[in-house]
Amino acid sequence: QQQVKQSPQSLIVQKGGISIINCAYENTAFDYFPWYQQFPGKGPALLIAIRPDVSEKKEGRFTISFNKSAKQFSLHIMDSQPGDSATYFCAAATGSADSWGKFQFGAGTQVVVTP
Amino acid sequence: NAGVTQTPKFRVLKTGQSMTLLCAQDMNHEYMYWYRQDPGMGLRLIHYSVGEGTTAKGEVPDGYNVSRLKKQNFLLGLESAAPSQTSVYFCASSYSSVWDGYEQYFGPGTRLTVT
């Protein structure tokens, strides 16, 4: 079973709009939450990551919002551009001894930005 | 630097055949990982290694074996391929623990089809 649930599966946004992708998790031991961007035919690449001690992290047009009590986190892409069209994966990881180095990925969201 | 490379890029196997996927990294990373990516499932960890000569099971290890005889190489073996192993396989590496904030770098993937 997937420990990280991601929604929506896909979204279409106009150029200049805001893309919002949501993820929810159950395991409270997770303490590292990265987002990955994947272009067709390529491997995923780290986009931005957050830890539960902060509620928001911003890097350029990309912002992660984190709600520890609700066990949810989301990615906001501001001023979306056609070059942002890709599949986005959220993930969660824990450094606990029995899951050392393991990640749980969401199912992915395909984002299409129309000109 | 080539980063993370994977060989081969594509492969078609018949049920019951065996093969080895090779992953190589030139970044002197300690940690290496093998994932499979299936539609609607995100990425799932097969096996990982925290250093030369060590390997550990991930989320979906059945039907796969791995070896890390050299620090820069991580091999994924399928002893008797099954159609359920049709997938895109990604190798990744990181300098140290990803939950300590070390980025996980992915290779370009190997598309495997088992008929």
Image: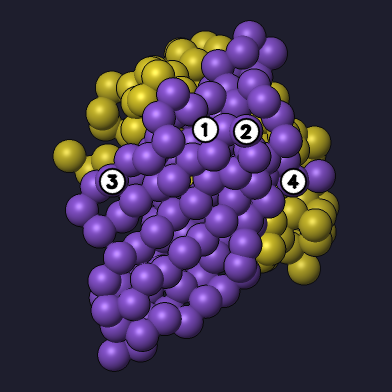
Q: Tell me the residue that label 2 is attached to.
A: A69
Q: Label 2: how many residues lie within 10 Å, few (<14), some (14-19) or many (20+)?
A: few
Disc 1 with disc 4 on a shared chain: no
Q: Chain of mark 3?
A: A
Q: Tell me the residue that label 4 is attached to.
A: A2
Disc 1 with disc 2 on a shared chain: no
Disc 4 with disc 3 on a shared chain: yes
Q: Mark 3 falls on what kind of element?
A: strand
Distance from disc 1 to disc 4, alpha carbons, whole Å, reads 19 Å
Query: In the rendered structure, which disc, 4 or 3, sits on the residue that comes first in sequence?
Result: 4
Q: Position of residue B61 (x, y in %)?
A: 74, 34
Whether the residues at callouts 2 and 4 have beta carbons within 8 Å, the answer is no
Q: Tell me the residue that label 1 is attached to.
A: B33
Q: Specify the farthest residue to the bottom.
A: A115
The residue type indicated by label 1 comes to Tyr
The residue type indicated by label 4 comes to Gln
Disc 2 with disc 4 on a shared chain: yes
Q: What's the colour of chain A in the image? A: purple
The residue type indicated by label 2 comes to Ser
Q: Tell me the residue that label 3 is attached to.
A: A58
Task: Tell me which corner region of the image, top left, top right, bottom left or bottom right, holds residue A25.
Answer: top right
Distance from disc 2 to disc 4, alpha carbons, whole Å, reads 20 Å
Q: Chain of mark 1?
A: B
Q: Label 4: how many residues lie within 10 Å, few (<14), some (14-19) or many (20+)?
A: some
- Foreground mark, 1 or 4, reads 4
Disc 2 with disc 3 on a shared chain: yes
Asked if one can make out residue B24 in the rendered structure from this viewpoint, the answer is no
Q: In this rendering, is residue B96 above or below B59?
A: above
Q: Chain of mark 2?
A: A
Q: Mark 2 falls on what kind of element?
A: loop
Q: Specify the farthest residue to the left.
A: B1
Decide which of A102, A106 is in the foreground and name it.
A106
